[in-house]
Amino acid sequence: MNNWKEINYPSIFVDLADELAELRTFHSKHIYKEGTEKFRGEREHKISMLGILSELIARHYFEGTDFETEVAPLVVENPVVGADIILRDLGEEFLVDVKGVRKSASKLRINFKAHNNPKKKITHYFFIVPISRKKAKYCWVSHNEVSSWSVKDSTYTKVYEKEIAEVGD
């Protein structure tokens, strides 16, 4: 696993993420409804905004690489089951799931069912922690490594979990 590194990004991404989160929330209200394990309640907009901001930061990061990049749409009616970003280079392919993490978080979490879904082919997770309007930190974790993390019961479902302090050690 790589250590945490920092990246700068355009501050306009924060405003774009806020606007796009309104659309994503509207389109996904039939999925994240009360009574389901996917229900987010009043947190829906903030969770969507963090996810979109993280995906924008990741796109910005990979734009400066030699990888051929394919990205999933930021806003669709139904969530995409699959990679947020596909990177290709010299015959290798990396299927990346971007995960936004709150600055105050002490743990990284991956939904147990999503991680083990055979239809969601992922090779790596790209964790992004926005730390200001222009700076974030990030780290890579392989799908196989996440499989070795502790499994815990979260509010509505099981998750793989790892202390952030242990990531990158």
Image (tube, grey):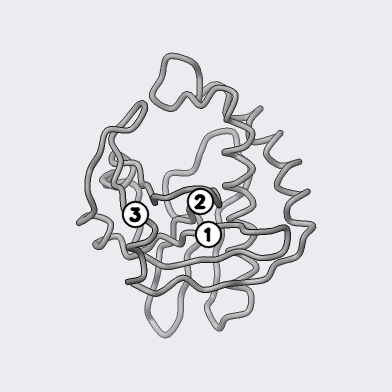
User: Mark 3 or mark 1: which comes first in sequence?
Assistant: 1
- The crowd level at tag 2 (other Cα within 10 Å; few <14, some 14-19, many 20+) is many
C-alpha separation, residue under disc 3 versus residue under disc 2: 12 Å
> Which secondary structure lies at badge 2?
loop
> Which secondary structure lies at badge 1?
strand
Q: Position of residue 1 (x, y in %)?
A: 33, 72
Toward the viewer: 113 or 110? Answer: 110
Toward the viewer: 109 or 96? Answer: 109
Q: Quadrant of residue 167?
A: bottom left
C-alpha separation, residue under disc 3 versus residue under disc 1: 15 Å
Residue matched to label 1: 128
Toward the viewer: 167 or 159? Answer: 167
Going 36% across and 27% down the picture, which residue do you hit?
Answer: 155
Q: Position of residue 37 (x, y in %)?
A: 38, 24
> Which secondary structure lies at badge 3?
strand
* Number of the front mark, 3 or 1: 3
Question: Would you say the residues marked 3 and 1 are in contact, meaning their CB atoms lie under 8 Å apart?
Answer: no
Residue matched to label 3: 163
Vertical side of 168 occupied by 47: above or below: above
Residue type at mark 3 is Glu
Vertical side of 24 occupied by 73: above or below: below
User: Mark 1 or mark 2: which comes first in sequence?
Assistant: 2
Going 71% across and 42% down the picture, which residue do you hit?
Answer: 20
Task: Please state if 25 lies on the left or on the right of 97 as rendered.
Answer: right
Question: Would you say the residues marked 1 and 2 are in contact, meaning their CB atoms lie under 8 Å apart?
Answer: yes
User: Mark 3 or mark 2: which comes first in sequence?
Assistant: 2
Residue type at mark 1 is Ile
Question: Would you say the residues marked 3 and 2 are in contact, meaning their CB atoms lie under 8 Å apart?
Answer: no
The circle drawn on residue 101 is: 2
- The crowd level at tag 1 (other Cα within 10 Å; few <14, some 14-19, many 20+) is many
Q: Position of residue 2 (x, y in %)?
A: 38, 74
